[in-house]
Image (cartoon, rainbow, N blue to C red):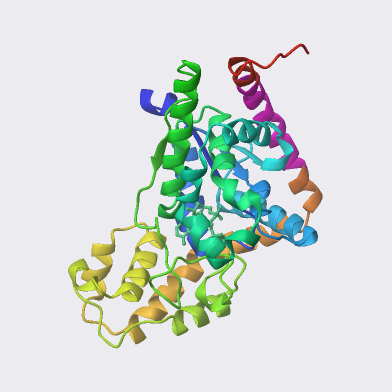
Amino acid sequence: MDDQARAMRVFSGIQPSGGLTLGNYLGALKRFVSLQESGVESIYCIVDLHAITVWQEPGELRFATRQAAAGFMAAGIDPGRSILFNQSQVSAHAELAWLFNCVARMGWLGRMTQFKDKAGKNRENVSVGLFAYPTLMAADILVYHATHVPVGEDQKQHLELAREIAGKFNHDFGVEFFPIIEPVIEGTATRIMSLRDGKVKMSKSDPSDMSRINLTDDADAIARKIRKAKTDPLPLPDSLDGLEDRPEARNLVNIFAALDDRDPGGVTNEYGGKMFSEFKPKLADLAVAKLEPVTSEMNRLMEDPAEIDRTLGQGAKKAAELAEPILAETYGIAGMIRSR
Ligand code: AQP
C-alpha cells in the first residue's frame, strides 16, 4: 500500500430502498471492492435511516437490508477487511446529523436536485427526513472523518453540500476538526441509465422493472431485458463521437465496457458497424457471465439471515468504536457537557 492509500479512509453507503440494481453494482459495489483490494481502510454502510425518508414497509425493509448486505459480500466485500453494517445500529450517525441540521441552511437543502426530483409537486407532503437527507449523509461520512467517498454522479451535489457543512462547522467553531472530503466519481459506470429511457438514471425505485437489471435477476430475465432495451435503428458507430445524441446506445456501450473492465472506445472499435440485433446478445451473454456468480452467492447467503445479522452486528460494533470518540469531540466543541 502506498502513502496516499494509507492516508485515506473511505466511506460509502447504499439505501435498502429496494433490490440492488446493475447501476448500484457497476457504479458502487464493484468500485468498493477495488478500493478494498488496494488496501484502503473502508467503511460500507447499508443506509436504512436514509431509506425511510420515503415509506418502507417494515418487513420489506428488513429483507432489503439483508439482501443488500448479501449483495456487498457476494460482490467481494470481505467483512473481515472492510467494515460492513447497517446505519441504524450506530446511533452516532443520527446524533451528528442533528448537529448538522443546526449548521446547514434551509436554502442549501432546498437547492438539492434529488429532493426536488423526489418531492416533485408534492413538496408540502413529503417527509422532513427527505428534505434533511443530505445532512444525515454528511454525518455518515464525517462521523468517521472519512476522506474519500466513492459514489455515482447522482450523489455529487450531496457531497458538495457535505463539504459546505464541514467547512461551516469548522468556521463557526474556529476549529479544523472535520476534513474536507473528496468525492471519488470515476470510471465508465458513474451513471448507468434506465434501459427504457437513456436520459434517466437506472434506479431501484423506478416503477418499471424492465428499466433495470436487478442483482437477483436470472439469466432469462437479464437476456429479455437487454433484448427489449430501447435503442435506435442505426448500427453502432466505430467511435465514441458517433454516440453523441444517442443516449440509449451510449448506455449499452457503457454497460458493456464497465462489465468487461475496458474502455467504451474499445467496445465501439470492436462493434462499430454492427446492428443492435448482434450487439445485444453479446451484451446479454457478458452480463449473465459477470452477474450470475454474484446472484448465486447472494442467494446462498440469504439462506442464513441470522448469519447476515451477526455480520452486520459485528460491523456495527467496529464502526461505533471509530465514530463515538469523534462524536464526543464534536459535542465538546459545540459546548455540550459530557459527564459520563
Ligand atoms: N444508475 C446508477 N449508475 C451509477 N451509480 C449508481 N448508483 C445508484 N444508481 C446508479 C450509486 O449507488 C450508490 C448507492 O445509491 P443509493 O441506492 O443509496 O441511492 P440512489 O442513488 O438514490 O439509488 P437508486 O437506485 O436511485 O435508489 P432509489 O430509487 O431508492 O432512489 C450511490 O453511490 C449511487 O451513486
Q: Residue 83: x percent and y percent?
A: 61, 36
Q: Residue at x 40, y 59 (%)?
A: 191
Please say whether residue 323 is one of the residues in the magenta stretch: yes
Q: Residue at x 58, y 50 (%)?
A: 131
- Judging depth in this view, the residue of 221 and 330 nearest the camera is 330
- The answer to whether residue 250 of the structure is visible from this angle is yes
Q: Pick the quarter of the image with the C terminus.
A: top right
Q: Residue 328 falls in which quadrant of the image?
A: top right
Q: Is residue 338 above or below residue 92?
A: above
Q: Residue 16 falls in which quadrant of the image?
A: bottom right
Task: Report the span colored magenta.
Answer: 310-327
- Judging depth in this view, the residue of 12 and 279 nearest the camera is 12
Q: Pick the quarter of the image with the N terminus.
A: top left
Q: Is residue 236 above or below residue 90?
A: below
- The answer to whether residue 2 of the structure is visible from this angle is no
Please say whether residue 98 is one of the residues in the magenta stretch: no
List the single residue furthest toward the top: 339
- Judging depth in this view, the residue of 235 and 207 nearest the camera is 207
| Relative side of 63 to 220, left or right | right
Q: Magenta stretch mostly in which secondary structure? A: helix
| Relative side of 109 to 245, left or right | right
Q: Residue 335 falls in which quadrant of the image?
A: top right
Q: Residue 91: x percent and y percent?
A: 71, 34
Q: Residue at x 76, y 62 (%)?
A: 57
Q: Residue 28: x percent and y percent?
A: 49, 51
